[in-house]
Image (cartoon, rainbow, N blue to C red):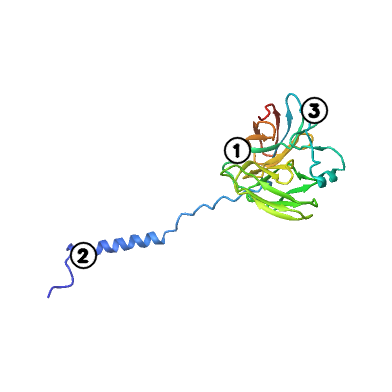
Amino acid sequence: MESRDDPPGCPARILSDMQRLVVFLIAVLVAAPSAPVPPPSEPMSPQQGTAIIKGSVKIKGDIPKRRKVRIEGDPKCAALHKGAEYLSDELVTDPAGNVQHAFVYVKKGLEEKTFEVPKKQATLEQRMCRFEPHVLGIQMGQELMIRNFDAMMHIIHAVPAPGSNKEWGFSQDKIKEERTKVFDKPEIMVPIRCDVHPWMSAFVGVVNHPYFAVSGPDGKFQIKGLPGGTYTLEVWHEKYAPVELEVEVKDKGTASADFALTTPKK
């Protein structure tokens, strides 16, 4: 019978030593601490930024008059206005040409950042056979509350661009009747109309950040809470071609952006 103890240097002894070495290396690798995985970036709150961009939107050139709209075809709408003129919201200016209802937003400069979706709802209301506000901004995923204050039927119809947000529509005919909707893709702008009253329209700017504003009756706007940086801002208006401006602003600083609308849309 052969001895179980192999002499030094024999193949069986060499194989056994190699096996022990492999087992030892595996144990070392298993016991070694793994490299820490960096945590995912947290969504940024607009309160974290300290910079402000403010400015104005103005027509350069001839200032068109606000358009009159005939609403006598709907006696209920006409009765709400008691014979007063109904003026369109599509182009509203003051005598100096300062423009209301212009949507100003950060177009470039925030690509590497993500932002919390606001819990507060944006609102769009039907009052006196108008949509109020005529222009508004909203973040993707934020709820839009649509509310009726007219004692008549409106059919609210969102008409996004093909391949963008989903088209939807519904009716409201009771005072304080409400429904919420959400847009899940950026879009400048989503038209909303009433299929009963063709003069009623609104526009919603959907963006993936909170840095936007709508110009007031004096044409002025303000965007707060930005991180310091260089941004491309764009202004959208229903009747004029968009205009871009590049703006640099420092943390805790304020920068200006004054837009001139020069080219009417065809």
Dividing the picture into quadrants, the one containing residue 261 is top right
Residue type marked 1:
Gly
Residue at the far top in the pictured view = 61
Residue at the far left in the pictured view = 1
Separation of residues labelled 3 and 2 (CA atoms) = 99 Å
The residue lying toward the viewer, choosing from 219 and 203, is: 203
Residue 155, position as x, y percentages in the image: 71, 49
The residue lying toward the viewer, choosing from 165 and 107, is: 165
Q: Residue at 60% of width from left, 47% of height from top?
A: 165
Marks 3 and 2: CB-CB under 8 Å?
no
Dividing the picture into quadrants, the one containing residue 205 is top right
Q: On the image, numbered disc 2 is attached to which residue?
A: 13
Separation of residues labelled 1 and 3 (CA atoms) = 32 Å
Q: On the image, numbered disc 1 is attached to which residue?
A: 109
Q: Secondary structure at mark 2?
A: helix
Give the crowd class for mark 2: few <14, some 14-19, many >=20 residues within 10 Å. few
Q: Residue at 77% of width from left, 31% of height from top?
A: 98
Q: On the image, numbered disc 3 is attached to which residue?
A: 96
| Discs 1/3, front | 3
Mark 1 or 3, nearer chain start: 3
Residue 134, position as x, y percentages in the image: 74, 41
Residue 260, position as x, y percentages in the image: 70, 28
The residue lying toward the viewer, choosing from 51 and 180, is: 180
